[in-house]
Amino acid sequence: MIWLTWRQFRGPALMMAGVLTVFGAALALTGPGLADDYAKGISGCAGHADGCARFLDRFLDSHQSAFLGVSGLLLLLPALIGLFWGAPLVARELETGTFRMAWTQSVRRTRWLAAKVALVGLAAMAAAGIGTLAVTWWASPLDKSAVDSYPRLEAIVFATRGIVPVGYAAFAFALGVTVGMLVRRALPAMALTLAVFALVQIAMPTFVRPQLAEPVTTTSAFSTRNIDGVGEGGLLHTQARVADPGAWILSSRTVDKDGRTVPLIDLPDADMARCDRAPSPGEAMQCVTDTANRLGYRQEATYHPASRYWPFQWAETGIYAALALGLTGFCFWWTKRRL
Amino acid sequence: MSTGLRDSVIRARGLGKKYRQRWALQDCDLDLPAGRVVGLVGPNGAGKSTLLNLAAGLLAPSAGSIEVCGGPSAADVAQLARVGFVAQDTPAYARLTVADHLALGRRLNPAWDDAAARERVARLGLDPKQRAGTLSGGQRAQLALTLALAKRPELLILDEPVAALDPLARREFMQLLMEAVAEHELSVVLSSHLVSDVERACDYLVVLVDSRVQVAGDLDELLATHHRLVGARRDPDRLPAHQQVISARHTDRQTTLLVRTEEPIHDPSWSVDGINLEDLVLAYMDRTAPAVRRPRLEVQR
């Protein structure tokens, strides 16, 4: 049975191997250069007064499209696996009637399904594993410079590094097989698989991932780092910052001295005038910050610390693995009883 | 061979299959003898295909039971090995070559007869390297039959195997089937809506209409015991008890009956004729046709 599955799956498997090879080669060629530039830049900025912030921004900026492109490709991989490997796996046999040939050989139909699911499913997970390994390695200098703009716990970076892509691939594949089995036609099954998988991929970081652990809430005084700018008439635009670089900030608000939420900080004109007279922009910002603190404004933030990255990776992979196992179990039951 | 000739190769009791709300087969009782080539005939929608899929174990019954070669169909690997199946439209893996299909059969069947399969493919003139998707309908049917035969089943089930084939391919297919049946001790059940296929190949006939077996028996025996009686108009109820009326047609002056009887017909007022298979099958199909259906058909013409 494994032979038959391999014989059917050979084409798609070789194609995937080819795509991964090209992708891997591209990363292997550009990766060392990227790491080199990063190392040079870091050692170059070590002595500077403002630290490496400017270098890191520039470094990320100049590689941003590659950073997002590579991450995006890996984000797409599980969806494509569900679409092209999962959905047609059983649906095409049902559609063309070949299941009648397969099931009337001297082999139980559950073994037929087991061979299919095991071989193609493991290949799906392996492909995602290779993909994430390559991307995690390639992007590590960029990830280090992107702690603020793209925290590791959030959306695209979290979903395309570490071990979660393997869980995504397993789930997408199992989802495709299940939908194909129920819909019994390859093309509609592919469309439906894509739609459902996309919904799950949106729901996960929006509703589930923030709940994986109790978020931390801090109230902190202002510093020049979390005041974005000063507007007309002394309105301060603030930005949530927490002491933990790379933290995933879920929500933040500015509260006044009575604990009420305020949309913006409105500094009195007298204080603004005083700060305007500061000799340098840096000192002006310092003056504004001090004033805000003196008036009792505080920044409140709810976040997940960066240290939760691996626990979250394992938890989310576990959730997807459990979903994949559940769907696979359903497929076996359905094949035995209902198909 | 575990099934003796006396046993039924397929035995169904109260067999039914329901798809969502609709019964495709309902309350079907059937006993098919082993060692015969059984032709299963009936109009479209009679439940032939459902019955054969149930027998092959591809479907599970919604009601009743079906036993094949002495056991529940497709209950285990041994049971699967006993039954060969050629599905309607003879599906094959389009991307796989002819040789791949033979390899598939070899790997998935313990009793696989590789030499016979190769020899058959060679004789059919099929190129082993050719993909099944590029075969003609006739060639694909032959490939499916080759696969089912090389499995060395006790029972071979064919679900409308030649329905989609042209007359030449149809004859070649039936020829190969007949050779195989002659060569191996093999029970065959073959469904068709064409009487000519059955006439050529089968020695046992089952007419299935609306899930019910209308008539089942040895083909020659059936032909010998059915007669067409033509005579002056009269009431068919007044016939001798042993004469079972299958169909009756009356004009103003004449009555034409199709009767079944084991005994000779002595009444001199009838002119007695033998009937052919097609008459027989049509008479049984007609018998159950709802009265409303016939006028509507005529209107459509």
Image (tube, coloured by chain):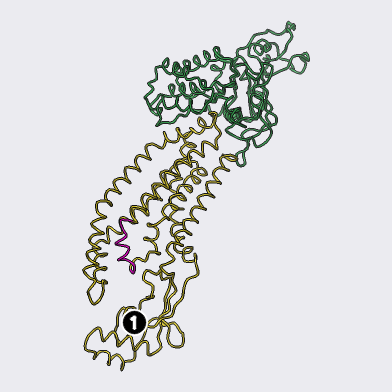
Chain colours: A yellow, B green
Q: How many marks?
A: 1
Looking at the image, residue A15 lies above or below residue B169: below
* Residue A213 highlighted magenta (yes or no): no
| Closer-to-camera residue (A157/B129) | A157
Viewer-nearest residue: B223 or A9: A9
Residue in the picture at 37% in, 68% down: A246
| Amino acid marked by disc 1 | Ser
Q: Is residue B66 found left or right of B170 in the rendered image?
A: right
Q: Position of residue A207 (x, y in %)?
A: 48, 64
Residue extending furthest bottom?
A: A270
Q: Is residue B277 above or below residue A123?
A: above
Residue designated by label 1: A223
- The N terminus of chain B lies in quadrant: top right
Where residue A235 sits, quadrant-wise, is bottom left
Q: Residues within 10 Å of mark 1 (few under 14, many from 20)?
A: some
Q: Nearer the viewer, residue A34 or B69?
A: A34
Q: Where's residue A252, x and y in %?
A: 42, 76
User: In the image, which residues are magenta?
Assistant: A137-148
The image shows residue B107, relative to residue A192, as above or below, that is above
* In-front residue for pair A80/B232: A80
